[in-house]
């Protein structure tokens, strides 16, 4: 792995392929999204955005938990509305920054993902989970409805399934998470990295430029009406088609050869 900025709480590495791995590194605290962790994540995301050779981001974690959400002890030390407004605005900024990256973001979920941790999984473009991972939005157990986690959650799974999780605080396992659309792939814990590598290989074999155009369009079009969505999608495809990667890809298809995107 090549050098990349690293903090004690967030390990940031970049390999020769352009895969940035951001590893939550407070395992004793279940990798909570503390103020410091949110700041470290935002900084790392901005570093990825500034790297023209970036191809993929992997969000991973050390320890038994992927992420147990916000730091409740840190939150309990405050009682003023302004503090919480800033905290949740900072978290939302991180989530939107992941969506706005021009490269795919994959969650590597090895353990518990709850509340804002489940939000982080849902916000990633793709997710690969260990069969032992569990997912929940259980803020309601502490009298706090997981409103911000509900934003990406309901954009991943059906509304009634999301509402049941939000109202009851009950957890789902990895198989249920895949069936409901929260994760893409499930593997046994010792095969998790191999499964992730398969997904990475499939992505890295395709052109970055087309993915950047497509990802931006994907998120924009689902938030507008169907007519506007078709207009946006048509313009995106037109711009993609005149790009050299599509020109080469189509020519390669016609000539029955592999495209040369190097």
Image (tube, rainbow, N blue to C red):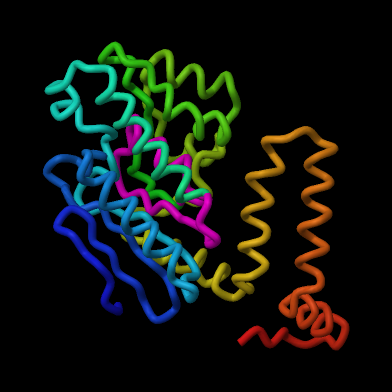
- Taking the view exactly as shown, the residue that stands out farthest to the right is 254
Q: Residue at x 24, y 43 (%)?
A: 65
Above-or-below relation of 118 to 196: above
Residue 235 lies in the magenta stretch? no
Q: Is residue 62 left or right of residue 160?
A: left
Query: Which residue corresponds to the image point at 65% horizontal and 84% vertical from the top-left?
Result: 261
Q: Position of residue 7 (x, y in %)?
A: 18, 60
Residue drawn at x 44%, y 78% is 17
Does 159 appear above or below 198? Answer: above
To which quarter of the image does residue 227 belong? top right
Where is residue 173? Give x, y as percent.
40, 35
Q: Nearer the viewer, residue 189 or 140?
A: 140
Quarter that holds the C terminus: bottom right
Image-quadrant location for residue 121: top left
- Within the image, what quadrant is residue 166 found in? top left
Q: How many marks?
A: 0
Closer to us: 241 or 58? 241
The answer to which of 188 and 49 lies nearer the viewer is: 49
Residue 107: within the magenta? yes
Q: Is residue 230 left or right of residue 69?
A: right
Residue reaching furthest to the front? 82
User: In the picture shown, does residue 20 fall above or below 147?
Assistant: below
In the rendered view, would you say 84 is above or below 67? Answer: above
Query: Quadrant location of the N terminus?
Result: bottom left
Please state the extent of the stretch shown in magenta in the rendering.
100-127
Residue appearing at x 28%, y 24% in the figure: 84
What percent of the width, then of the height, locates residue 189? 32, 54
- Decide if residue 217 is on the left or right side of residue 225: left
């Amino acid at each position: 792995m090549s050098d990349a900025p690293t903090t004690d709480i967030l390990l940031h590495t970049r390999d020769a392929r352009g895969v940035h791995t951001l590893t939550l590194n407070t395992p004793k605290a279940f990798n909570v999204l503390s103020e410091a962790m949110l700041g470290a994540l935002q900084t790392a995301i901005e570093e990825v955005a500034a790297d023209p050779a970036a191809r993929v981001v992997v969000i991973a974690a050390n320890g038994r938990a992927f992420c147990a959400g916000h730091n409740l002890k840190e939150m309990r030390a405050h009682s003023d509305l302004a503090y919480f407004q800033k905290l949740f605005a900072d978290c939302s900024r991180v989530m939107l920054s992941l969506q706005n990256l021009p490269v795919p973001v994959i969650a590597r979920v090895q353990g518990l993902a709850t509340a804002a941790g489940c939000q982080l999984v849902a916000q990633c473009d793709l997710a690969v989970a260990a069969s032992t991972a569990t997912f929940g939005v259980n803020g309601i157990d502490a009298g706090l409805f997981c409103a911000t986690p509900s934003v990406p959650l309901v954009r991943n799974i059906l509304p009634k399934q999301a509402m049941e999780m939000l109202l009851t605080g009950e957890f789902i396992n990895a198989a249920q998470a895949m069936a409901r659309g929260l994760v893409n792939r499930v593997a046994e814990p010792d095969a998790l990295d191999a499964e992730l590598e398969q997904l990475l290989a499939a992505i890295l074999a395709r052109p970055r430029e087309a993915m950047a155009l497509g990802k931006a369009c994907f998120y924009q079009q689902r938030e507008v009406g169907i007519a506007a969505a078709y207009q946006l999608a048509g313009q995106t495809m037109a711009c993609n088609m005149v790009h050299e990667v599509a020109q080469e890809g189509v020519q390669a298809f016609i000539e029955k050869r592999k495209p040369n995107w190097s």
